[in-house]
Amino acid sequence: MPPINVLSKEISELIAAGEVIERPSSVIKELVENSIDAGAEHITVEIKNGGALYMRVTDDGCGMAFEDVPTAFLRHATSKIVTKTDLDSISTLGFRGEALASVSAVSKVEVMTKQREETYGTIYHIEGSQEISHEKGGCPDGTTIIIRDLFYNVPARAKFMKKDVTEANAVSNIVQKITLSHPEVSVRMIRDNRLEFNSAGDGELFSAVYAVYGRDFARDLIPCDYEHEGIHVSGFVIKPLYSKNNRAFQNFFVNGRYVRSRLCSSALENAYSNLIMTGKFPACVLMIDLSPSAMDVNIHPSKAEVRFTDEKKVTDAVYFAVKNALMNDGLIYEFELKKPAVDWTAPAPVQEELPQQSFFTPVDQIARKEQEMSGKPEVVGLNGFEGYAKERTPDPEPVKFFATPEPTGDPFANSHKAQDIAVPAPVKSKPIPEEMPHEPEEAENDAPLETAPIEGFKYLNQSAFTAPAAPVDNVPQTPVNPLEEEFPDLRLIGEAFGLYVIAESGHKLVIIDKHAAHERIIFERLMSRNCRQFSQTLLTGVKVLLTADQFSAVEENQELLADLGFTFDLSDAPCVTATAVPTFIMELDMEEIVCEVAENLRLHKVSPQSGQLDDIFHTVACKAAIKGGDRNSPEELLSLVKQVCYDEKIRHCPHGRPVMFTMTKSSMDHQFKRT
């Protein structure tokens, strides 16, 4: 083999630089993080030509001493770590002392820095890790670093640089993440002499989100705040209706550091399960604060990923934080009215006099002659001129209006024909009844949405935020559903197009998609784990091999599995034998479903049923729900309206479509120019 040589300093530094500096955005990330670690309150980032030719980062931080500046550009030179025990309590963004050394190895760097107590600052030039000049001079407090000609000495790396606009977008994206992670710092981004955004630096996360993503994005956010076992999750998540087409707007920050985390992303999307449409992804800006010793940030060269010592705690904290935020918000969307194209209150424009001409266009004149020849009567058009008769399709069924007597019982209990409640095609053994049995409506409204199998976890609903009424004469009072106060005096107005139910409540107009609403109601009843009545005993049990952890999870959750319709024989560990399963999964791959249910139980998921079982619930609910065009009595429609308005769970159909919109009287007055 060839002889073994020790690499020269120049080559080894170029190799090391390639691990940290991949493109201009990598440089900006390292420099801005150093500025934040230096205690800067104002940071300006400027790039030209995507950053390949020019980058500047200016801050008002603590600055560096004259004698420390050359040392800062040596590899593994840092002020943040002294002993090995410091690695267990890293609280700064940078700590390895590789950023400046890597940047200087592949570019031309100019530094101007000054500490507040010093009279003169320091001006330092370094190119390709070679010092050019080091002298004192006048400069403002803080540090300014200018990077020119990135990869000038590594043409192979420069060849793989993308177009200027692509590199500039990458720089802008990383500055946005840093701005969101530190709302207490005012960050200004300048791109090709144009100001892209400027954050306030007032310490409010919402202000930073508004500056980075704009008003429309910020308007659709829900605040989030949750703490569990030393892990604090705060920030904002987006309303399900405004979900995005990709995961680009999922922002997770761990102890102030932006990270890419499949773990957190999975927990976020699980919390939105059955609330967003297929192909859509939730957006968020979530800050996760935990002990530095509970994570390892030194597993990725650019520190873009972290490893948690207890992943389950982090997953649970993110999941329940998002779920509780969604339940607390209520997810009631206001119907948006577009402004009229013409302002009817404005004075009519003055028009020049035109020569007198016929009121009829050539097409109108031809049609009129055809009319006269056919002998058909003329029709006066909407514009006041004579037109011609056209064949028209029958008008759609008019909106129905009627009185609204008080309903008695559950009008939906026997309102469907048998074929409307048909079970999906593969299921042949036992039909689904017309309505799932359920608790009285008051009990449903007062109960929590769902209780997790993990002790201490509970979804919050509207009643959780309202103190119970004081007892009168030692007689307990029934707690009032706060949603009944939000929707007082519900009155049915009618039904439009055989699909949309219109009701009035106080100063609000409520519009409900009856199919989507009833579909969600049935789906929630199926998901309530009251499936014992659908359990079907098998003639031949299905034997499945599980891991030891999965077997223990199944053994510890027999009652929960019985609620889902499953019964298992556990006499042949680590194998389990399914002796009874829900009827509507009889034709599916039973072994796969049992494995998935067992794995979900092992992970202590709140909803242990498999994805296939979830899909079956979707199908059953869709087939069982009333359809558009079905005729329903006023009592049925009013009952549906009350179930939707008074239950915060009924806000989206299982496929993610919104169920209800509201329209305020003030917005309608504004639309009609009454205000």
Image: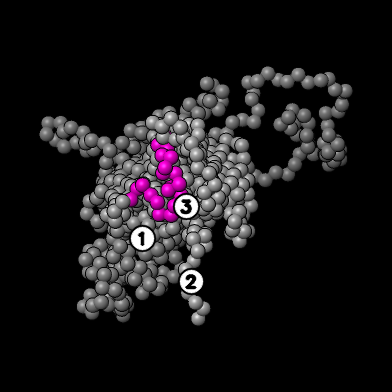
Vertical relation: 52 (above or below) 198: below
Label 2 sits on residue? 5
User: Of the residues tagged 3 and 2, which is closer to the observer?
Assistant: 2
Label 1 sits on residue? 433
Q: Residue at x 50, y 28 (%)?
A: 667
Q: Position of residue 451 (x, y in %)?
A: 26, 52
Q: Nearer the viewer, residue 605 or 539?
A: 605
Q: Nearer the viewer, residue 291 or 275?
A: 291
Label 3 sits on residue? 101
Image-quadrant location for residue 533: bottom left
Span of residues in magenta = 60-81
Q: Is residue 511 visible?
A: no
Q: Position of residue 257 (x, y in %)?
A: 40, 48
Q: Is the residue marked by circle 2 packed among few (<14), some (14-19), or many (20+) residues within 10 Å?
A: few
In space, the residues marked 1 and 2 are separated at their CA atoms by 79 Å
Instruction: Farthest residue to the left: give it.
Output: 474
Q: Is residue 80 visible?
A: yes
User: Of the residues tagged 1 and 2, which is closer to the observer?
Assistant: 2
Q: Nearer the viewer, residue 616 or 271?
A: 271
Inspect the magenta stretch and tell me whether residue 71 lies in it. yes
Q: Position of residue 461 (x, y in %)?
A: 31, 43
Q: Position of residue 78 (x, y in %)?
A: 38, 49
Give the mark, 3 or 2, whose residue is nearer the N terminus.
2
